[in-house]
Amino acid sequence: MMRARAPGFSAITGALAALLVWAGHFTLIYGAHALACERGFADAALLGLPAVPALVLGASLAALLAVGLVGWRAWRRLDGSLAAEAGEDAPRFLAWLTLATALLAALAILWEAVPVLLLHSCR
Amino acid sequence: MAGPPEPDPLSPDAPLPNPLPRPAGELEALERAWRRPTGWRFPTVVNNTWIGVLYLGTALLFFVLAGVLALLMRAQLALPENDLIGQDLYNQLFTTHGTVMMFLFAVPAVEAMGVYLLPAMLAARDLPFPRLSAYAYWAYAIGGLVFFSSIFYGAAPDGGWFMYPPLTGKQYSPGVNADFWLLGIGFIEISAIAGAIEIIVGVLKNRAPGMTLARMPIFAWAMLVFAAMIVFAFPAVIWGTILLELERAFGWPFFIAARGGDPLLWQHLFWFFGHPEVYIIFLPAAGMVSMIIPAMVQARLVGHGLVAMALLGTGFLSFGLWVHHMFATGIPNLSLAFFSAASFAVSVPTGIQVFAWIATIATGRPRLQVPMLFILGFLFIFVLGGLTGVMVAVVPFDWQAHDTYFVVAHLHYVLIGGMVFPLLAAIYYWAPAAGGQGLSRRLGTFAFWLLFLGINLTFFPMHVSGLMGMPRRVWTYPAGMGLEVWNLLSTIGAVVAALGVLLVAIDVLLHFRIKGTMAGNPFHAGTLEWLPQGNYAARSIPRVTSREPLWDDPDLAEQVLQGRHFLPGTATGRRESLVTSPVEARPQYLAIIPGPGWAHVLAAIGTAGFFLSLTVEWVLVAAGFGALAVASVLRWLWTGTDLGEIREPAEIGGGLRLPVYATGPESVGWWAMVVLLLVDGTIFACLAFTHGFLWLVNGDGAWPPAGMALPPLPAAALPAALVAASGAAICLAGRLLRRGRALAMSLAVLAALGLLLAGLGTDLQALRAAGLRPEAHAFGAAVFANQFWQGVHAAAVLVMALYLVARSWAGMVDPVRRLTFEVVRLFWLYAVAQALAGMALTHLFPRGLA
């Protein structure tokens, strides 16, 4: 009998890692912000910085680092060549897909973080 | 495998898996196994081609029915101060129109396309659980038709398709209308989930050998993402539906502000489903477009990988958009900005797809056949809808346009452009694959122009009437405000579009034929659904070595038809599907799949009857239907699943010998249960969100409110210990089974059952003894909703445990034949973990914060 050589779940979730980081980041910033506003922490301070923007930006930096790590590992698996979606070889294709989703996730995280620099926390 | 290293049978350089000539009788045996039932036995059919066509036909029937409701509304609005249709009926018309279009047309239609096309496209014999698709179809068809007929009795829901409380609460909607929505639509969501499980497992485990994820067609990617989105989106609306029905039936105040509830809780739950829903409908349509354009222009899809990435990205980002339906609810601006930014972000992957399609058209030689016309119409209408979508993603603009006809225009441009036009393109494109000559080019071209002009004439003026301030859902409007001309134009457009639909219907009735066999590839497409097909799908299952196998290997169709690829016959004389690994698609085992039967049909009747009788509070009738459903499901499982190793491993060609039975993570049953548990876990997350949200809006002081208290913490220790012991006992049962001690295993299972029921029962008892009741305040309601949900799981575990013990006593469970046990254990351990998490939520969550 032939055993499965390829990993199942792990290969698929690996390709989704960056998007999962995005989901965690989005849940965190929205949840923390809603909590801060509902419980009157709008103008609270954290280490001398305004708490809500500091928290959101800190979480965003951490998320971008994580996404960057996912993307960098995928890039290394591609040996630095981005040529045309890595062809039809399954492991290279998944690495390419991981890198591409990491770029999209980074863009979304960045866009979602920027408003804290522009808006008051809870109005 | 011993001996010298053999060439990889999946490599393109290896010889074809099976030699000629094929043994006599091989094809006949295959045909016999896959023959479809005829005559009065027809309802027992499970072949995906037939269920797919029935599914799609029923969905299109609902499209026409809901379209008629829309025409009635347009007739009413054609003139100001019209009294053709009264206010009450108008409310039912728009609610039923939206509900039917979303739940009974759009989702089932794309699911039907998946059921119909995926096996052919992946060169699978069928989907992994054919009776499950058939069950989902019959439950949907019966339930949907009864639901629709409620409008003839004035009993249709009338609170808008998103059913906002307090309007839909008992106080303002005392009749059964809202219950028809909650119970009638609620179980159609279950049918959608059944289809989603089928599609996920089918796409990941039933692809032809060699069809790696890198070679998988874009439509399969789209359906995979679509099904995964259903898994995570539908639980929110199922949970919301349960809460609203509990509130309406028993007065548990989840959404009643005076008793600690909050109507916004519904909006969060509904839109956490409702926004992804838009993409749930759009992504399969986009997947079809990505299949049709390459064939129409005879060029490979530009940016195949980018399009796959866009589908995945959209699947995720669309879960970060739900609050953009709630911009006008007073949520802090910064929160709105997060969702506004996510709404912009999601337009990036959609834009990538649009440009990939345009680039593909540009690289090829477009043929203006009917499917291509609908694709071009789709691009035009959908892009316009997308642009107004970016407009309403801007918070200040949304405040102006909110709940006006501008939004009506936007959503119809997106949904008709993004889903109806691709679906029509798909019907014209794939009709020849069902057999026959395909649909008429002349009728199709006429229909396209009527629809294209009609749709634009109907909905473009709504942008204007919306910006002039006409609110949506009004049954009439006064003269002299400048709205007359725009509304009259919309009504004329609706009539033109309806003529287009009529032409399509005539064309389908005249020219659509289903034949047992399909030959030919009229559009010269490159993917496997254009292989010659019978009831058994392709004669042999091709070894796939590229993305467009029919373009790269012109002899493939002939080789497949001759039976020179994998599994050219049936190894067991029954229906079989080739199960492959999820990433590389390497053959793992031959799964025996069930054929026609009545049990799943009766189960569907029972399920639909149960929910519909509850709507009108016929409790005894509902109990009868419920018993029928459970008994039929058990019979279906008993006779059709977990057959064991009925023969030794079988040769499928290329030197591959595959077992005919598998357990654990190789088996499709294991994967299906894991997907179901993802659904279940998401519902539990919604339950936890309900607690957290209500705690947040009530404040620590009122959670629990004065005069209401939880039992002291030690009271939770015993229930938790009993539940945990149940988990240990089911694991012990697994060890006993491995040693072949069937009787001891049965006893351990029964003990585990007793421990679970005792644990949950003592917890409930402690809460009641402390004086907690669900009716007085949302705190009690949330605690008892948790109890209710644990009780549902206890009931499921009870049925599963007794089934397992009965199977064991019948000698159908042993150390080898253990799939039933493994699947039950997975669910059981989940139920134990969920019960412990539920107890932590009840007993630790508010206390831990104090």
Image (cartoon, coloured by chain):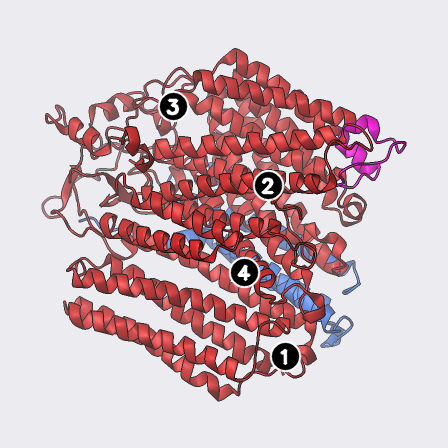
Chain colours: A blue, B red
Sequence-wise, the earlier of marks 1 and 3 is 3
CA distance separating discs 2 and 4? 57 Å
Mark in front: 2 vs 3: 2
Residue span colored magenta = B461-487
Q: Amino acid at mark 4?
A: Ala
Amino acid on which disc 1 is placed? Pro
Horizontal and vertical percent position of residue B231? 47, 52
Amino acid bearing label 2: Tyr
Q: Is residue B593 visible?
A: yes
Quick one: quadrant of the C terminus of chain B? bottom right
Across and down, in percent, residue B782 comes to: 57, 70
Circle 2/circle 4 CB separation < 8 Å: no
Q: For the point 53% across and 20% down, which residue is it?
A: B504
The kind of secondary structure element at disc 3 is helix
The answer to which of B568 and B734 lies nearer the viewer is B734
Spatial CA span between label 1 and label 3: 61 Å
Question: Mark 3 belongs to which amino acid?
Answer: Ala
* Element type at mark 1: loop
Subunit of mark 1?
Answer: B
Q: How many residues crowd mark 2 within 10 Å: few (<14), some (14–19), many (20+)?
A: few
Foreground mark, 1 or 4, reads: 1
Dots 1 and 4 on the same chain = no
Q: Which residue is mark 3?
A: B433
Within 10 angstroms of label 1, few (less than 14), some, or many (20 or more) residues?
many
Q: Which residue is mark 2?
A: B153
Which residue corresponds to mark 4? A66
Q: Which residue corresponds to the image point at 15% horizontal and 60% vertical from the top-left? A: B811
Q: Nearer the viewer, residue B112 or B253?
A: B253
Q: Which residue is mark 1?
A: B704
First along the sequence among labels 2 and 3: 2
